[in-house]
Amino acid sequence: MMYSIYAESTPNPEVMKFVANRMLADKSIEISTMEQAMGISIAEELLKFPFVKSIYLSSNFISISKENTIAWEDIAMQLRAFITNHLNDNGIKNYTEHISSEKRKETKSKIEPLKEFSSEEKKVEAILNQYIKPAVEADGGAITLNYYKDDIVCVDLKGACSGCPSATSTLKGGIEALLKEKLNPNIEVIANEE
């Protein structure tokens, strides 16, 4: 079976999600430079488009962040066709299987880090993974726990969530409220500003 791709909008007006009918990656990675692409052919080729700002590759989708000087209606079909053709020309494969922990450090790429969390951080991470992560991924983004210390939960936002106008209200109204209810009424949620 070959790849087929459909495009869907996200809450972030600068990001479109391109969803495949098959898995593309076993690691999630945010890419904005050729160095960060680390030999991922689809990312390298997409970055050649002058209107592509960054790419978030995860499981079966690619979220593309565009420059605000161009409208999606002018490029979405072109990108969808390009992605479909590129994937089918290269065959079914895992685009991130060659990326090891060593390569992550060498290139300082934005792959989701593997961290050792405290027992309290593991509780926060479990709540995020169960209740928040599926909805965020459905919107073409990702959320990961950065740390939990002194009643502050710091999260990393990637893909469509990074720079999204509604991210602050989602953090405060959704995630913070859920963590206060399930874990600690004094929790405050902030986004990591890397």
Image (cartoon, rainbow, N blue to C red):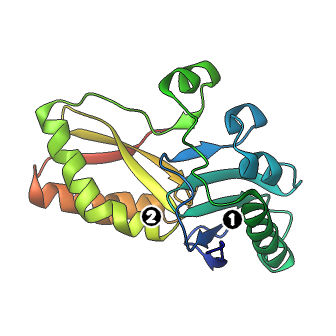
Could you tell which of marks 2 and 1 lies nearer the N-terminus?
1
Residue at image position (19%, 37%) is 121
Q: Position of residue 156 (x, y in %)?
A: 43, 44
Judge whether 166 appears above or below 24 on screen: below
Residue type of the residue flagged with mark 2: Glu
Name the foreground residue: 31 vs 182: 31
Residue highlighted by disc 2: 137
Left or right: 72 with respect to 27?
right
Q: Which mark is residue 14?
A: 1
Which quadrant of the view contains residue 134?
bottom left
Residue at image position (20%, 62%) is 178
Which quadrant of the view contains residue 123?
top left
Residue at image position (69%, 58%) is 65
Q: Position of residue 29 (x, y in %)?
A: 56, 44
Question: What is the total number of numbered labels drawn onto the structure image?
Answer: 2
Quarter of the picture holding the N terminus: bottom right
